[in-house]
Structure formats: structure tokens, C-alpha cells
Image (cartoon, rainbow, N blue to C red):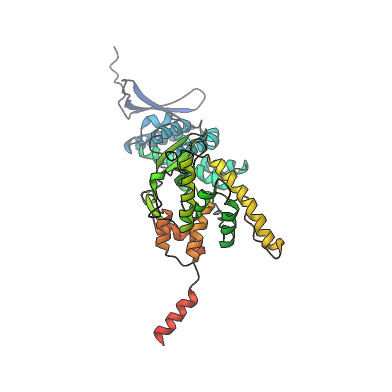
Amino acid sequence: MSNRKRRGRGEASIFQRSDGQWVGSISLGYHESGKRKRRTVYGATKGEVREKIDQLKTDVKAGVLPDGSAITIGQLLDRWLQTKKASLGVRTFEERQAVIDNHLRPRIGGMKLSKLNSLHIDGLYADLANDRVGAPTIRGAANVLGTVLNYAVKRKLIVHNPAAAVAKPKVTDREMASLDDEQARAVLLAAVDSNVFAILTTALGTGMRQGELLALRWDDIDLRKGTIFVRVSLAQTRDRQFHVKETKTKASRRVITLPADAIDALTRHKATAMKAGLLAAPVFCTRNGNFLNKTNVLRAFRGVVTKANKSIGSAAENAAVARLIPETIRFHDLRHTCASLLLSKGCSLKAVSARLGHSNPSLTLRVYAHCLPNDDLQLTGELNKMFA
């Protein structure tokens, strides 16, 4: 029987192999199964191995889980997704999953989490750019990766987030396609006889998000008072499934006063729905009373835009310089139009922010500052009066 004692936790064994490489092995306690946790490191010199052993001891003292060394980034991404499935909206979850499956997993999914460093992340962003992935998508991938690595830090799988030291790609804000007064009127005139007239009029008159409009029920609208109560929103998944969810933020749950033209359009729209027996269906629905597909709404809207542009071009003295509506306009740009027109007329920033359902007027100011009227001359006039 040997009297040699077993090495305890934290005690290392270092030796040199026949090929000259140095090997170090350290005990880090036991798994729940009772099996000993051991880590093995390699180096060209005994000193290099000793440094790695010391770093392992430091990591253990810092609370880093030894098992984290065996996790791949792909496994970490999957684990993070599972933890977020219940808290993220259906569409948001799909977007995060798409970023992971299309951009992160194929490039770094097989790498060990413990090996990931800032140089790898630099290379990831460069590879995405070389593959002609757009800057907004790369920044989205960077945001997801940073969030996932922060999750790993909180779970003590790694000591620090290697993405924190890497600059994210810069993204130029997309210019909003906002309509002016003439263009907005042309759109409504072109839509009068279409099946999207009511939704376009309501969108321009309220600044509501498309999901909020498509989730509306007649119980949410009081035509006598001329108000809409926004309480839910409609999400549409990639496989065309619909999900009614809570509004985007607490501030998004709001009451909006309708302009007269929107009240008239909704009154006529309700009469039509009553004749068709669709009062129990969504306000804006298919002939069968189902939710409208966003793609179909956009297609119909752009058809109206094409008709409106013909009217704008024929009415202009010089058709070559007529301010036509971009054919690539989004339905969401009607929300921008409502906000831009109200602010350009000098309406209260706070009131417009509340109408849009923004969580803070500072967000409204950041997005729409360029729409505010320049009152510098008026301010100077008031100062002259004060100090005259």
C-alpha cells in the first residue's frame, strides 16, 4: 500500500512529455455526480504552464464556473435563447434567433467560450462586412452577442465580456420618408374608393403603429366621443401566424382623440362592417373577419401611392420637378408623417410624444428635432421687447 496522499483541490501536477511539451493538471473539486473536476493546460515551458495554472486558480476564486471552459459559443447562444423565449415577444424572439442562426452560429458557434477574445470578435465583424452583410445587421449581431456574453459573465462562465472592448459598427440613421401636406392629401384622395381608406386615414390622423391599428377592435373605438383606446398590438411571425400582445411600452397604452376625417372614415367603415356581420372581428380585417397580413396592407398602400403620384405629377406645373412620394415608402412612414406634420405646425412636443406612445419626450425630440420650426427670429424679437 502506498502512503502517498492524493492531491487536494487546487493542487497542481506539472510534468514534461517526451515530445518536450509541458503539461499541467489541477483539481477543481467535484461534480454533483461525485466525479472529480480536473483541468489540463499545455505550454512550451514550465513557467507558461505555471502561469496558466495560476490563472485558473484566480478564475475559480472570482467565481468562474470551471464547467464554462467546456461550453461552446453555440451552446451558450442556445441556452440564452431558451431563457429569453418566455420574456421576449414572438417577433422579437424570431429576430434574435435569425441573427444567431444566420450570422453568429456559422462563424463562431463551434468555438469554446473560454477561448473567445476581442480579436475573434473583431474578425467576426470584419467577416460579416466582407460577406456584404449590411451595417445595421452587423450592429444587431453585435448587440445580441454582447448581451449573450453579459449573460455568461453574470452566470460566472467567464470573468469579463470580450465584446465590451470592441467598437460596434457605426450605422447611419435611415432617413424617414415623411409626407408633406400636399402628398398626404393626395394619398387620402387616391385611397377614397379603396378598401384601405379607413386604415390610412386613421394612421395619418393618429400616428399609431401598424401593429396597434391591426389589433383594434370596435370596443376600443368610441365614435361618439371620437377616441381610440390603444391597449394591445398585433405581431406577425415569419410563418404568418398572428399573436395579440401587450403594447410596446406602458406609455403605448393610451387614449387618442381622433380628427374629424378619421371619425367620418371609421363611421362609414363600421357601417360596412355591420352589414357584413363583422363587428366582432378586428376593425381592419379580411372579408372572412381574420387579421390582415402586413404584406398585403403594404401592397395595397403602395398601389394607392402610385395613384397619388400620378395625381401629383399631373397637377404640377413642371412634372419633372414634382415632389413625388418614394415608391419604397413603408406603412410605418405614415406614423412619421403624422408626427412630422404636427411638430412642423408648432404643436407641443410633449403632446405629440404622448400621441405617439413614446416612453419619453426626449425620444421624440431625438427622432423629430429636424421637424421643429425655427423660432430663432421670434425669440430675438421677444428679447428685444424685454430689454428695450
Quadrant (top left/top right/bottom left/bottom right) for the C terminus: bottom left
Q: In this view, does 185 lie above or below 195?
A: below
> What number of labels is visible?
0
Point out residue 303 in the picture as x, y percentages from the top left corner: 62, 47
Q: Is residue 282 left or right of residue 6?
A: right
Q: From this viewpoint, which residue is outermost toward the top?
A: 1
**Viewer can see residue 198:** yes
Q: In this view, does 303 lie above or below 259?
A: above
Closest to the observer: 190 or 306? 190
Residue 87, quarter of picture: top left
Residue drawn at (51%, 40%) of the image: 292
Closest to the observer: 48 or 129? 129
Closest to the observer: 225 or 210? 225
Point out residue 88 in the picture as x, y percentages from the top left corner: 41, 39
Q: In this view, does 91 lie to the left or right of 126?
A: left
Q: Is residue 330 left or right of residue 113?
A: right
Point out residue 134 in the picture as x, y percentages from the top left corner: 59, 45
**Viewer can see residue 89:** no
Quadrant (top left/top right/bottom left/bottom right) for the N terminus: top left
Residue drawn at (49%, 47%) of the image: 269
Q: From this viewpoint, which residue is outermost toward the front?
A: 275
Point out residue 48 in the picture as x, y percentages from the top left corner: 45, 35
Closest to the observer: 107 or 365? 365
